[in-house]
Amino acid sequence: MMSNEKYKLHPISAVINFVNVLKDMIVPLIVVVVLNGFGTSNESDGWSSYITSGIYAIILVFLLVSGIIKWKRFRYWFEDEELRIEYGLFVKKKRYIPFDRIQSLNYTEGIFHRPFGLVKVKVETAGGGPTKEADAELTAITKQAAEQIKKVMLQAKNKQTVELEETVSIEEVVKVETRPIFKISMKNLFVLASTSGGMGVFFSGIAVFASQFSNIIPYERIYDEIVVFIRFGALLIALAVFLVLLVAWIVSVALTFINYYDFTIRVEDDEIIITRGLLEKKKITLPLSRIQGVRIVENPLRQWTGFASVIVDSAGGSLAEKDEKIRLLPLIKKSEINPILEQIFRDIHLEPTFTKVPKKSRRFFYRLDYLWILPICAAVIYFFYPYGLLSLILIPLSYLFGMWQHRTAGFAIDGQHLIMRYRNISKVTIWMEKRRIQSMTERTTYFQKRQNISSVITTIKSGVGGESSTVPHLDKADAEKLLNWYEPFKSQIIEKEQPE
């Protein structure tokens, strides 16, 4: 029997709620503060000089009080094999989540949780919601309370029957020791951080920050200073660019290191358990039944050094927190991938004999690039002659890149599994089960039809939507072979598009 006792969150939830709301409002608050001169005032202003500071104080107090109210009004309990939640002040809301629908419980230990031995619990259900938010979130509860939820859920699913005894703690009853299948080394963590491409995120963050202050940033003065700076010579400019890129790289390395520190994978009871993080320790539970596809991604630098990343596509929910393509192996030597994946997935084989795209389709991999490269080169040469002639280098580079894509593309059928390989910038190898493929499309353009070739697109579930993979410019017979292999799944959708 389940107890109807109602449980509260830990009081630190009020502080966490306050900080979360403050974090979401920090940019608007900074803009308001800057536009009002940082709240500075003159003695001649009298009592009115304190109005701005008073408004800031009232806002902060209001946010803190709202966090306290949210904590005070939040309750959860177990009843009729459901997790029930009640919250709200003026409008009381209730949410009932059947335990048999819960797919995973994901845990996070932030800087406010660790000193008190607490965790944040995100409840993910089978269907998920229309948004990427969790179905339910318990902001701060003890680890024992989190294990209690897990125990009651397992009992409701008849996966595990446990009789509680006063002398045995809940955590000891439920906890099962498993050997890690994979744990990232410090060396690989540094390589991951160094090649993560996080500099783009860094510069994007600077751009967003600058856009918030576009009204007060003295762009004309900065431009004049840059003009003066340029007069000192190209050497100083190159040095400045190098220093900016170096700082961006260091920030990128630090953020990736903090995010993926102590990355570990375990498998227990048909679930993949991923733990990671330095300042904020996260624990993600991923049911094997929700995995739709496995991707090996090799960007050019990692491919050259023999490394790759393994990503899995998960159906529904918000397991990856805004990214349903979960990094199962953030960075690993390619030679070590198969032994690890074979411990997780049955019948996986990622190095079969591939059917390559034909030689006659080679031109299709670079011809479209010329449509935008040639006009750009002509414009650059016209306005920046003679230095604009350097833009002609793009033409052979585009050709070589097309050849690289042509040599990569292909597919293989392995029983009830399909392996596709293609390249945009990174080389991608994706493994899919036939029953997981949502649709398969053969697409033939007018020019492809003349050469008797087609492109094949497959779609699998990923998050609340879908993820498509394309092997372009296959021989027509190979494309038909793929469709014939997939055809027995009458419940799925197979489309053939042949524009006139």
Image (cartoon, rainbow, N blue to C red):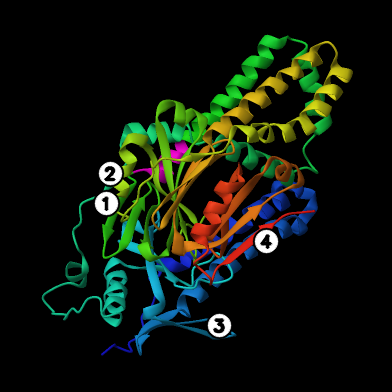
Task: From the image, tell me which residue sits under label 2.
Answer: 339
Q: CA distance from mark 1 to mark 4?
A: 61 Å
Q: Are marks 1 and 2 in contact (CB under 8 Å)?
A: yes
Please indicate whether residue 384 sits to the left or right of residue 248 in the image. right
Q: Main secondary structure of the magenta part?
A: helix
The amino acid type found where label 3 is placed reads Leu
Depth check, front residue: 186 or 292: 292
Task: From the image, tell me which residue sits under label 4.
Answer: 54
Q: Are marks 3 and 4 in contact (CB under 8 Å)?
A: no
Q: CA distance from mark 3 to mark 4?
A: 26 Å
For label 2, the crowd category at 10 Å Cα-Cα, with few meaning under 14, some 14 to 19 and many 20 or more, is: few
Foreground: disc 1 or disc 4: 1
Judged from this view, the residue extending furthest toward the right is 382
The x, y position of residue 429, in whole percent, is: 47, 43
Q: Would you say residue 361 sits in the magenta stretch? A: no
Foreground: disc 3 or disc 4: 3
Asked where in the image residue 7 lies, by quadrant, the reply is: bottom left
Q: What residue range appears in magenta?
A: 254-261
The x, y position of residue 291, in whole percent, is: 42, 60
Q: Are marks 3 and 2 in contact (CB under 8 Å)?
A: no
Please indicate whether residue 390 sits to the left or right of residue 26 in the image. right
- Specify whether residue 353 is in view: yes
Q: Secondary structure at mark 2?
A: helix
Task: From the image, tell me which residue sits under label 1.
Answer: 343
